Image (cartoon, coloured by chain):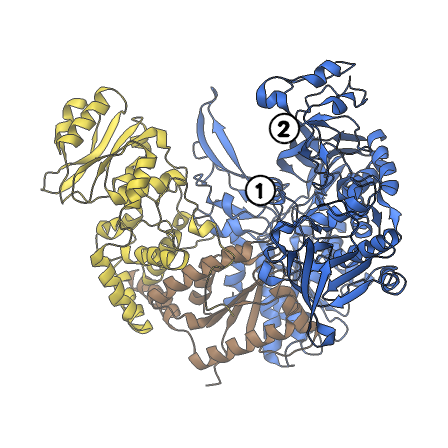
Amino acid sequence: MINLVSRADELLESKAVQVVIGYEAGSTGKARPAFITDPSKTGSLIFDDRCVQNLAVYLTKKEVRYFGKAAIVATLPIMRSIMMLISEQQVFAENIVVLGVSAEGKYIDIAGIEVMQQYIATCDLGNPAKDQETLAMLNKMSTQQKFDFWQKELSKCIKCYACRQACPMCYCTRCAVECNQPQWIPVQSNLHGNTDWHILRAMHLAGRCISCGECGRACPVNIPCHLLTMHMADQVHNYFNVYAGTTDKMSSVMSTFEPNDKESFIQ
Amino acid sequence: MSEFEPKVVAFVCNWCTYAGADLTGTSRIRYASNVKIIRFPCTGRIDFMLLLKSFANGADGIIVSGCHPNDCHYTSGNFHAKRRWIMFKELMDFMGIDMNRITFSWVSAAEGARWAEVVNTTVARIRELGPYVSYKQMVNTAVEEEVTND
Amino acid sequence: MARIGVFVCHCGENISATVDCHKVAETVGKLKHVAFSTDYKYMCSDPGQTLIKEAIKEHNLTGIVVSACSPRMHEPTFRKAAAEAGLNPFLCEMANLREHCSWVHEKNDMTTDKAIDLVRTLVEKVKINSALQPIKVPVTKTALVIGGGIAGIQSALDIANTGHKVILVERSPSIGGHMSQLSETFPTLDCSQCILTPRMVEVAQHPNITLYTYAEVEGLDGFIGNFTVKIRKKSKSLDEKICTGCGLCTTKCPQKKIPNEFEEGLGFRPAIYVPFPQAVPNKPVIDREHCTYYIKGKCKVCEVVCPTKAIRFDQPDEVIEVQIGAIVIATGFDIKRADFFPEYGFGKYKDVIDGLQFERLASASGPTSGAILRPSDGQVPKNIVFVACAGSRDPAKGIAYCSKICCMYTAKHAMLYKHKVHEGKASIFYMDIRSAGKNYEEFVRRAIEEDYVNYIRGRVSTIYERDGKLIVKGVDTLLGGQPVEIVADMVVLATAGVANHGAEELAQRLHVSYDSHKFFAEAHPKLKPVETNTAGIFLAGACQNPKDIPDSVSQASGAAVKVAALFSQNELTREPLVAFVNRTAPPLYSTCVGCFLCQSVCPYQAIEREDFKTRDGKIIKTVAKINEGLCQGCGTCVALCRSKSIDLHGYTNNQMYTEVMALLNEY
């Protein structure tokens, strides 16, 4: 990753950016996010199979914004997250530099939003293959089987909201679960509250989920909650022929409509 | 035990279905009294969370109804609602929550007879499906858990 | 502490025949916070309303639920009664026990139980209702009329005559529109110019009307009573204040071969021109696209000959911003030209013309001074064929609608021809004769019976040229589909009336809706044919759909009355059932994160941006803000907002949630 390091170095040295968001090796052998502000420290940046976390989540954090302009190491899902954040006016294109990494782990020069858009257009934007398999398996189940599957999974939820914290699109200052007038979601981590929470989360990410799978990875009790939002992404593409995060001027699927949207269940 | 009487909540828009149901009344067309209507300004105002709340609080069935496409009093509220219903239904199907419990329909202010038909077919269907326990059970287990935790 | 009053109405026996009203009042009366509960025969009667008012005062009620008929019927009545007793009208709710209960169910316990549930639900809701104050918005008493055809002229004059200021914007160099092109008008055959020009002059001289010709509306902001409009006054390359309109420049301009739009291409005009002799204003403009000076950089003949030195070659366009309170759109229509019809030669046969071209031929001020002559060789056509429904009522051509005016003007054309060419033969191919209108049918009968116009019921399949004649092949459906072939000297197509060019762009600029044919859409096809979906913007004339002159004028006057009614108030009062974005203490300011997805769901462009700034002007946060003047209260944004930062007065999240909970749970 010579290019990545030298480019990060160059950006910090020239003060084009004040922080580089990337990955570095953690103490337990896992990759962890790195926030590098000192050009002499860019050598610790790594990129390998361990680097899967969606770093775009940090772009909206005020602690990171505090540094100033940021360069961010970005694989496809991160690039798509950035597109979404720009189109939802949470991040401004002029405040970030994208250090692209291809699916093969090679550095790609992303000289601007248009280049990123062109790159994204060349990629497969569907859900990851292994998740597709699980989704297909679940879709084949009967209603009762699906219900039992999810009830079993959701009964494990401890309402830690790691799924929300890990998601770049869950940037609201106050989430609907924290709204107590009315109390939309029961506070306790019980089956009812858990189910309502996961439905709410999936609905709020409909048309906005870019299939990074970070929520599922973040879950400490291994609920495959990413399948819920990925299913929504699938359906958004199925019904409206849209993949989220392909341009910086995306009009959200759930805030637009076509008069001839097809459905077969409304009487 | 007496025959099961389903509880059905209807979420309707003020301008079409609510007015349509008024017309059912003025036309004296009889329908099942199991349904109770909640008035919204527009189908675009209906929050999907309210449907879940209804199930959690004992509704056996739900009707959601508004103006036919292109007839929305606010020009496009029903089109937005339609997209939301599509996604909501897909998610519910995926999570195994029975969508036969919800009737989505367009009933205009002129369709008094149709409103009675929508209500009657929904009530008959819910009667056949029986009481909706899955969602309520979740709540009940939750309450029991709390009690034992104390 | 809430003190709720419940008033159960028997509605004579309409409710009490199936619902045990007394039991309802009694059961609900036991609910927590219900301070007063009663039933009465007719709540809407005077004694009924007095009962409510007195109970409000006597029991110091903080909210009431009138359990009677549909709120769509009597909500205003009871809210007014509440207000008269000193209770905020929005603290009154209605439970619909008649239309939604007694009239549709059998008499039994379940029906009474349902009635109790309905009342109980609204009791819970009204407990958390807020007192709302009506929204007042000021009104700028100046109207904008877009389009200076007969509809625009009529609207402008009518509004101006009520004493209000009007700005009339016309895109071409003169007002008058299509009506100024017409020769005679049906069903009276009076000369179009003769009845129109006095109106045009009146517009120019009216002290309340400001006329901007050669100008277009570029943008619109704001809402009813408070619009800001941007108008681009295209450069006329002329100082109008100095120009006397002598017309010397137009005669000396060396560029003389520009197809004349007013003459529908049947004549020519110079580059500096007045569209027609009676134009208002009667001062020339330079058509920069065709002017030799603008193309080649030299000429300036007009500048040399102008006695008052009024020519200004470097005059720029001027964009002005005006405050207005209401808008009348009267941008008119256009017609399909002959080139739209491959079967009739794509417009390449010179003697296949459209209706407007025929008008110019028949007009005394037209290129032939009123003589009907073939455009190809100037000969008088001995045999003329008119084709009605050219394009109209033809779904295959994408125009399924009837253009409405063609039946009548085709009859008129045939008559005018016969009056001028007595020995000539006129035939009309038609689908149906649609002559509904005062004296219209009589007019058509005259064409047939007195002027011997040959009406053939059938369509024309093809027209082609042979030996300088036009072969018109059609069918006579009244003779069992027998083929008809006419060797004609000239063919006039009554082509479909279509939306004017630029209508779609204008609709988008004004945020009004339009139909699939790009005609402007009315708010309601029957009861609001003059209004658009945007409050304060009205329609007049053929911009809505093809219309004849009397219809356009009637609608124009209708639109003017709508504007005058609006201007009769100093302030507009609106129901406060609008959305609002929450506000919290700094540094959060609002739970809104400013994703602005709500902006695209709003049908009314009512969602604006609000910046919170530090003392030195740095933006800390940008959040959504509802423009109360524009919001109509649909609540589509409320259900979309993920962080629940937007809410809707009268239908708040808390109220709707409470209703659901109350309906399903017994407290």
- Residue C498, x across and y down, in percent: 66, 51
The one nearer the camera, C113 or C169, is C169
* Disc 1 with disc 2 on a shared chain: yes
Say which of marks 1 and 2 sits in front.
2
Amino acid found under the numbered disc labelled 1: Ala
Q: Determine which residue is flagged by label 1.
A: C606
Q: Position of residue A68 (x, y in %)?
A: 31, 26
Q: Chain of mark 2?
A: C
Mark 1 residue element: loop
The chain displayed brown equals B
Say if C230 sits above or below A118 in the image.
Answer: above
- The quarter of the picture where the C terminus of chain B appears is bottom left
Residue for point 86% across, 61% down: C447
At x 46% / y 44%, what residue is drawn?
Answer: C597
Quickly name the residue at label 2: C290
Looking at the rendered structure, the kind of residue marked 2 is His
Q: Nearer the viewer, residue B133 or C88?
A: B133
Q: Badge 2, how many Cα within 10 Å: few under 14, some, many 20+?
A: some
Label 2 secondary element: loop
Q: Position of residue C191 (x, y in %)?
A: 87, 45
Of the pair C630 and A114, the residue shown nearer to us: A114
Q: Chain of mark 1?
A: C
Does residue A212 appear to the left or right of C575 in the view shown?
left
Chain coloured yellow: A
